[in-house]
Image (cartoon, rainbow, N blue to C red):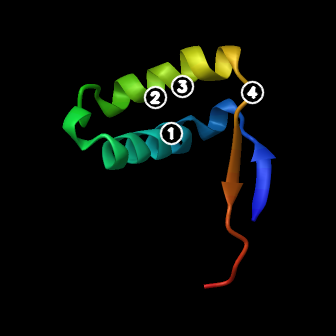
Amino acid sequence: MSIRRLTPADTDAAAGVHRAAFDETLPWLAGPRTPDEDRWFYREQMFATCTLWGGRSTARR
């Protein structure tokens, strides 16, 4: 696994992973926000106030 600090260029991916995990673990709350709202949250709130890290599998498929 490769881990790196995320940048604002990773907003779409970070918001997508967050939404997928949220919907999978809390299906009764799925869909209260739109993908645009999720991206706004990451761009304007998360990246502005937090250090975000992400991982990627380095295993060959």
- Of the numbered discs 4 and 2, the one sitting upstream in the chain is 2
Identify the residue shown where x is 31% and y is 40%.
26
Cα separation between marks 3 and 2: 5 Å
Q: Which mark is residue 32?
A: none
Quadrant housing residue 30: top left
Marks 3/1: CA distance?
8 Å
- Discs 3, 2 touching: Cβ within 8 Å: yes
Residue that carries the numbered disc 4 in the rendered image: 51
Would you say the residues marked 2 and 1 are in contact, meaning their CB atoms lie under 8 Å apart?
yes
Choose the circle earlier in sequence order: 3 or 1: 1
- Provide residue 10's location: percent of width, then percent of height: 62, 40
Residue 13 versus residue 32 in the image, above or below: below
Q: Disc 2 on helix, strand or loop? A: helix
Q: Give the SS element for disc 3.
A: helix
Mark 2 sits on what residue? 39
Judge the density around disc 3: few (<14), some (14-19), many (≥20) Cα neighbours within 10 Å.
many
Q: Which of the two labelled residues, at mark 2 and mark 1, occupies the earlier sequence position?
A: 1
Q: Residues within 10 Å of mark 4 (few under 14, many from 20)?
A: few
Q: Nearer the viewer, mark 4 or mark 2?
A: 4
Which quadrant holds the N terminus?
bottom right
Provide the residue designation for mark 1.
12
Look at the numbered discs 4 and 2 and tell me whether their residues touch, using CB distance below 8 Å.
no
> What residue is drawn where x is 36% and y is 46%?
25
